[in-house]
Amino acid sequence: MTNKGFTINERGQLNRFAIEPKIYVDETPRTGFTEYAEKLNGRLAMIGFISLIALEVFTRHGLISSLTNF
């Protein structure tokens, strides 16, 4: 008999140990050319491109000239 995560045996004794959850394996791929990886790569590329444009606007120099002047 179960009651809110605890079990009671046939003699009416309460088992205070929690019932273990069911274990499952997530089969979705996390590496390679997945939709999530492609979206993340695209978003990071857009952030980098906008950052380069902002660098050129604020410094009045291009990327190559900024790197050669340091």
Image (cartoon, rainbow, N blue to C red):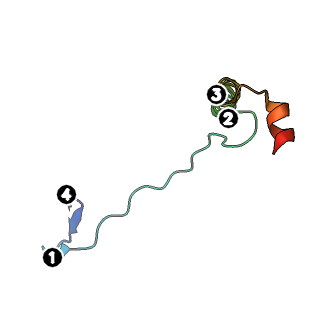
Foreground disc of the pair 3, 1: 3
Q: Earlier in the sequence, mark 2 or mark 3?
A: 2
Of the numbered discs in the image, which one, if any, rests on residue 58?
3
Residue under circle 4?
A: 4
User: Tag 2's secondary structure?
Assistant: helix
Q: Which of these two is toward me, 31 or 51?
A: 51
User: Tag 4's secondary structure?
Assistant: loop
Residue type of the residue flagged with mark 2: Ala
Packing grade of label 3 (10 A; few <14, some 14-19, many >=20) is few
Residue type of the residue flagged with mark 1: Gln
Question: What whole-number distance in Å separates the C-alpha atoms at marks 2 and 1?
Answer: 52 Å
Foreground disc of the pair 4, 3: 3
Q: Identify the image quadrant of residue 28.
A: top right
Question: What whole-number distance in Å separates the C-alpha atoms at marks 3 and 1?
Answer: 74 Å
Discs 2, 1 touching: Cβ within 8 Å? no
Q: Position of residue 61 (x, y in %)?
A: 76, 27
Question: What whole-number distance in Å separates the C-alpha atoms at marks 2 and 3?
Answer: 31 Å
Q: Horizontal placement of 10 versus 45: left or right?
A: left
Q: Earlier in the sequence, mark 4 or mark 3?
A: 4
Q: Identify the image quadrant of residue 45.
A: top right
Q: Earlier in the sequence, mark 4 or mark 1?
A: 4
Q: Residue at x 87, y 40 (%)?
A: 68
User: In this picture, is 41 found above or below 17?
Assistant: above
Of the numbered discs in the image, which one, if any, rests on residue 63?
none
User: Tag 1's secondary structure?
Assistant: loop
Foreground disc of the pair 2, 3: 3
Q: Horizontal placement of 28 versus 52: left or right?
A: left
Q: Earlier in the sequence, mark 2 or mark 1?
A: 1
User: In this picture, is 6 found above or below 14?
Assistant: above
Discs 4, 1 touching: Cβ within 8 Å? no
